[in-house]
Amino acid sequence: MADKTVTIEQIASPARRPKDQRATLIGLGLNKIRKQSTLKDTPEVRGMIAKLPHLVRVVDGK
């Protein structure tokens, strides 16, 4: 059985944001606007995405 994945895209700059939000972006594999990252769809990753709804968007969740 294939693992589910989620593709996320950074849509805003982390400038003038708290350090924990910048660290969360790096943890998601993002560092530039329009960059995309594909990760396993786990509760931990979903929690990180939920913490940054103003900086990232879910492109595809398979």
Image (spheres, grey):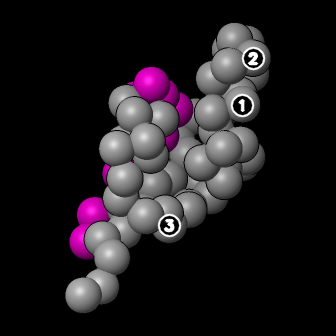
Q: Nearer the viewer, residue 20 or 16?
A: 20
**Element assignment for label 3:** strand
Q: Quote the CA–CA distance across marks 1 and 2.
A: 6 Å
Report if the CB atoms under discs 1 and 2 are less than 8 Å apart: yes
Q: Quote the CA–CA distance across marks 3 and 2.
A: 23 Å
Give the class, few, some or many, for how many residues have Cα within 10 Å of label 2's Cα (few <14, many ≥20). few
- The N terminus lies in quadrant: bottom left
**Element assignment for label 2:** helix
Give amino acid for label 2.
Answer: Lys
- The C terminus lies in quadrant: bottom left
Residue 57, by quadrant, is top left
Q: Which residue is mark 1?
A: 23
Residue 50 vs 57, above or below: the answer is above
Report if the CB atoms under discs 3 and 1 are less than 8 Å apart: no
Give the class, few, some or many, for how many residues have Cα within 10 Å of label 3's Cα (few <14, many ≥20). some
Give amino acid for label 3.
Answer: Thr
Give the class, few, some or many, for how many residues have Cα within 10 Å of label 1's Cα (few <14, many ≥20). some
